[in-house]
Image: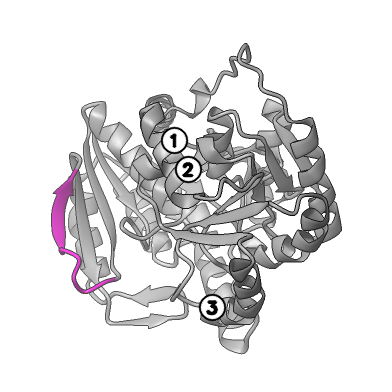
Amino acid sequence: MKILIVLTYYRPHISGLTIYAERLAKAFAARGHAVTVLTSQFEAKLPADEIQDGVRIVRAPVLFRLSKGVIMPTFGLLANRLVAQTDVIQLHLPQFDAAGIAFRGRIFKKPTVITYHCDLQLPPGLFNRFANLGVSFMNQLTAVFTHRIVTYTQDYAEHSDYLRSYFKKLKVIPPPVVLPKVAKEDITAFGKTHNAFNKHPVIGLAARFASEKGVEVLLNALPKILEVLPEALVQFVGPFQNIIGEEKYYEKLKPVIEKYESSGNWQFLGSLNPERMATFFPNLDVLVLPSLNSTEAFGLVQIEAMMNGVPCVASSLPGVRQPVMIHKMGEIFPIGDSAALAEKVIEVLKNKKSDPERNEDFSRYTPDNVAQAYENLFLDISKTL
């Protein structure tokens, strides 16, 4: 099967959406499919056409940016050629350019599936308001043209204005989650390197430094946490500087963060490759996900943490609360409530128990199983065309 995957940002860009797309693309390739990713050349140094891990990546040059969006004059021409060469199409939304691809899929009877990751909510501002409207309109067109829509959880679908309008097209498929196997020595070495003074508990936050991630909710919870657990250390993993559209957000919180950095209660570890992430999670005592709005639909890092026996404290957002509720590993708290976050973190840490007999089944998230679910969906669509 020839599979075309289309999204605005692909690796080396870091976000839950790009990680999902990369894992699924690799899984398709490993299952013997010819996989092509059409995306933006968001950095000029990136190759226009290359092969990585059996996946062909075609990048359309970017003329200029509009907030988090990109203008790619040759995107349509590339799409025409690649759609003609493909058997099935997978689109990752939100994405302004997806409607044109879905229309091509409908016209040429190519099974087309949307993977809907989240609702788009850009930061306040007149331009962003128009950008939100534009992307929302294009997403609606994409849904009309596409054959099926995939979402992570029924919980999120029932609370999304977008998804509620297309229940007949909806299919729930869990997201792909995988971590490389690493040696115990590497896990120990990571802890010694990044926590030389053996401060505990270690509270993890793995995300882009973006306003929807609710970093300030954790910052506001820290005074109460430190009253009870003065040696607590927050380790932030992910890009935190020069994030497109989030520079002001970082500058606003920087003075408070620097205070906790100087006291030894906060560390930025930067972006880590998958192998380093696999050594990061086992060194945590708890992972927090204080996200604020529906731009967060699940939180893949929760499953990665739980695979390592680490409980999570997540905001009670639709979809985001599901990993804790499904796997019973942690607590949820009201959205944006710093006092409640502090209470739940303290509660989880005080009640945390090592359970070597626990054998939680995370097989639903393996990329191979997720890829097979998509294959079955493509085949079902093909029967109706």
- Report the disc number at residue 131: 3
Q: Classify residue 236 by image quadrant.
A: bottom right
Dot 3 or dot 1: first in sequence order is 3
In this view, the residue farthest toward the front is 197
The nearer-to-camera label among 2 and 3 is 2
State the image coordinates of residue 12 (x, y, percent, origin top left): 31, 58
Where, quadrant-wise, is the C terminus in this rendering? top left
Q: Pointer 1: what residue?
A: 188
Structural distance between the alpha carbons of marks 2 and 3? 43 Å
Structural distance between the alpha carbons of marks 3 and 1? 46 Å
**Residue 243 or residue 49, whichever sits in front:** 243
Type of amino acid under label 2 = Gly
- Report the disc number at residue 264: none
Instruction: Identify which residue is drawn at 62% across, 71% down.
Output: 257
In this view, the residue farthest toward the bottom is 126
The nearer-to-camera label among 3 and 1 is 1
- Report the disc number at residue 191: 2
Q: Residues within 10 Å of mark 2 (few under 14, many from 20)?
A: some
Residues in magenta, as a range: 43-52
Is residue 71 something that shows in the picture? yes
44 vs 141: above or below: below
